[in-house]
Image (cartoon, rainbow, N blue to C red):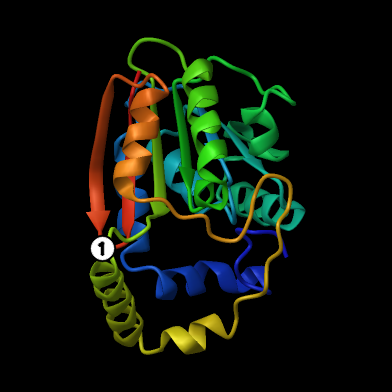
Amino acid sequence: MFPGEVFANTADFDSGIRQLLPRYDEMLDVLVRCIPSGAQRILELGCGTGELSLKILKRYPSAQLISVDYSPRMIEFAADKVRSAGYANQWKGIEADFGDWANYEINLIDGFDACVSSLAIHHLTDEMKFKLFQRIYDSLKKPGSCFWNADPILAESPALAEVYQSARDDWASGQGTTLAEIRSKIGKSTPHGYSNPDQLATLSAHLEMVEKAGFKTVAVPWKYYGLAVFGGFV
């Protein structure tokens, strides 16, 4: 399994991730709201099963969305979902490793109004995260274009790690299950391309990298324990 595929059975992803991560839909909804209403060209890094793609296309039906993922099964799953929802003409899936793009080893169409990602960038090392943020900045139109990422973050201390874990335990319990039961469906991933099993960084480290990459307005529009939406405007 590639990092990011999470569940051994792709069909388990949409329900499983909602049990595993507190307020998953709320997190993605906040990210989508942060995209400027006039955005016409949007790049998505790591489309997974297409949940974020659908939320973007429903809110901005005239936008063109290019979604990149290195997992063939995720691209196929997302494409079927987008097609069934009637947005095939507004969505294009590209099977590629966005780490290659960060290192200028492959080219994607530049000149985007927005770049977004969810549950994908945390698989990169900090060095590659920073390279990716720089590449994103270079690819965006100026001014007013933006980048937003929804990802798990590293707890700032052991005490907070316990707090974040407790919140996830309580969330799973509220969904009528346990983290152990959910994790029994998770497959074992191995490094692929530039991605590895979780390479978490603190929120402050992320914000420092985003600012250093060149973004002028850096913000955290949403945070819930060990999950955050962060990014900024060019």
Between 58 and 12, the residue placed more toward the observer is 12
Question: Residue 166 lies in what quarter of the image?
Answer: bottom left
Q: Quadrant of the N terminus?
A: bottom right
The single residue placed furthest to the top in the displayed view is 142
Between 174 and 129, the residue placed more toward the observer is 129
Question: Residue 230 lies in what quarter of the image?
Answer: top left
Q: Which residue is painted at 73% across and 53% down in the image?
A: 192
Percent across and percent down for residue 99 are 65, 37
Question: Residue 74 lies in what quarter of the image?
Answer: bottom right
Q: Which residue is painted at 26% across and 63% down in the image?
A: 225
Above or below: residue 146 compared with residue 193: above
Which amino acid, mark 1? Tyr
Mark 1 sits on what residue? 225
Percent across and percent down for residue 83 are 64, 47
Percent across and percent down for residue 150 are 40, 48
Q: Which residue is painted at 49% across and 33% down in the image?
A: 130
The single residue placed furthest to the front in the displayed view is 158
Disc 1: CA contacts within 10 A as few (<14), some (14-19) or many (>=20)? some
Between 71 and 51, the residue placed more toward the observer is 71
- The answer to whether 12 appears left or right of 154 in the picture is right
- The answer to whether 55 appears left or right of 13 in the picture is left
The answer to whether residue 32 shows anywhere in this view is no
Percent across and percent down for residue 215 are 35, 22
